[in-house]
Image (cartoon, coloured by chain):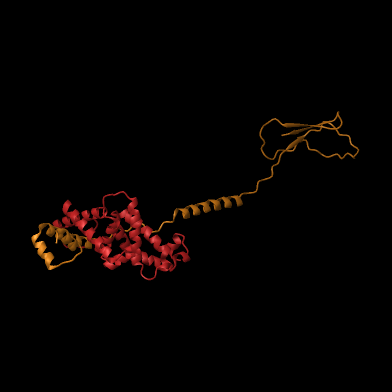
Chain colours: A red, B orange
């Protein structure tokens, strides 16, 4: 049994192919955290959600064949939706480091403001639209993968993404 | 086509010569198109950001019933261990003063037992009045008194 499974008291039967769990956490932790952060808007909530996601992964590891990325996205969206319903709307966290250092100071300010507004409006989108646009436009997943993760038709996801993009664009335009 | 229809087309990321022509003519749609494009770039960059990992690595927490079961088992184990390792209770020794004030007449041969004047107390005894037990015999002239400290 690997260290983490042992630490939380689960047996090999419960963890399935237990030795790979720590590797999976290392490989997918940032992706899960980032998606949860975009869906929830707060780092602490994202960390709580990621905790829940990996606990579910640990319990279901023996049922997952191959790379659990799609499974993790689906569970992350579900966990965040559950979490989101329990939360009161709080302002999104301060902007984080961005790895694209292209624009100058003025442009950066504008980008940060746009980023803040986007995060703000994301939190008020309907669940399905929020999940669809986060997975498609932020995580960069193909539409068919987003549809599979959310368990809906591709055409539905396209509509949800379009609606979300329009709402975001109109909000930024109105606020800036 | 109405502006609303163009908006949906723009949001879907579709481009066409007709759309370009409309954008050249409609300020509102052109502004919206710029907003959509700017958002697309920013959201792409957001996907490359890193979210701080918790100070302590992600550690799935135990559900409450596992914590409480573990706590209950621990308490029971500790109680059991304490009970098992308890030293045996020492026998209580009580000193008794016996004053014989009379002799019972009986047909059985009288055996003279050596009775010490006083058995020393082995454990501290509270300073209280001695308990006096008066024992009546079949002979009204013979009464036995037991004084118990």
Residue B118, given in percent of the width and then of the height, sits at: 75, 36
Residue B6, given in percent of the width and then of the height, sits at: 16, 61
Q: Quadrant of residue B129?
A: top right
> Residue B105 or B24: which is nearer the viewer?
B24
For the point 13% across and 59% down, the residue is B29
For the point 74% across and 37% down, the residue is B96
> Residue B58 or B143: which is nearer the viewer?
B58
Q: Is A79 situated left or right of B10 in this image?
A: right
- The residue positioned farthest toward the left in the image shown: B25
Residue B113 higher or lower than B86, as above or below? above
Residue A60, given in percent of the width and then of the height, sits at: 42, 64
Q: Is A26 situated left or right of A155 in this image?
A: right
- The residue positioned farthest toward the right in the image shown: B107
> Residue A158 or B104: which is nearer the viewer?
A158
Q: Is A37 situated left or right of A14 in this image?
A: left
Q: Is residue A103 visible?
A: no
Residue B28, given in percent of the width and then of the height, sits at: 12, 57
Q: Quadrant of residue B8?
A: bottom left
How many marks the image carries: the answer is 0
Q: Is residue B43 visible?
A: yes
Q: Quadrant of residue A54?
A: bottom left
For the point 14% across and 67% down, the residue is B16
- The residue positioned farthest toward the bottom in the image shown: A66
- The residue positioned farthest toward the front in the image shown: B1
> Residue A160 or A26: which is nearer the viewer?
A160
């Amino acid at each position: 049994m690997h260290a983490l499974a042992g630490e939380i008291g689960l047996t090999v039967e419960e963890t399935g192919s237990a030795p790979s769990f720590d590797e999976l956490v290392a490989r997918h932790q940032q992706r899960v955290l980032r998606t949860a952060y975009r869906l929830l808007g707060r780092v602490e909530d994202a960390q709580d959600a990621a905790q829940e996601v990996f606990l579910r992964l640990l319990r279901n590891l023996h049922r997952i064949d191959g790379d659990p990325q799609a499974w993790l996205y689906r569970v992350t969206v579900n966990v965040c939706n559950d979490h989101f319903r329990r939360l009161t709307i709080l302002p999104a966290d301060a902007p984080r480091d961005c790895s694209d250092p292209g624009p100058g100071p003025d442009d950066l300010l504008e980008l940060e403001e746009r980023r803040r507004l986007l995060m703000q409006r994301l939190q008020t989108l309907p669940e399905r639209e929020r999940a669809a646009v986060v997975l498609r436009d932020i995580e960069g997943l193909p539409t068919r993968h987003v549809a599979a993760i959310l368990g809906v038709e591709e055409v539905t996801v396209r509509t949800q993404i379009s609606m979300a993009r329009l709402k975001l664009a109109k909000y930024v335009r109105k606020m800036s | 086509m109405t502006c609303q229809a163009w908006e949906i087309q723009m949001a879907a990321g579709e481009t066409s010569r007709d759309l370009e022509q409309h954008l050249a003519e409609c300020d509102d749609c052109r502004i919206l198109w710029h907003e959509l494009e700017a958002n697309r770039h920013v959201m792409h960059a957001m996907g490359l950001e890193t979210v701080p990992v918790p100070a302590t690595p992600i550690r799935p927490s135990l559900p409450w019933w596992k914590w409480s079961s573990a706590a209950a088992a621990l308490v029971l184990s500790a109680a059991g261990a304490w009970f098992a390792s308890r030293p045996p209770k020492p026998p209580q020794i009580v000193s008794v003063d016996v004053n014989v004030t009379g002799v019972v007449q009986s047909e059985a041969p009288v055996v003279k037992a050596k009775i010490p004047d006083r058995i020393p107390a082995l454990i501290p005894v509270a300073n209280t009045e001695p308990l006096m037990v008066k024992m009546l015999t079949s002979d009204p002239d013979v009464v036995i008194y037991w004084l118990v400290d």
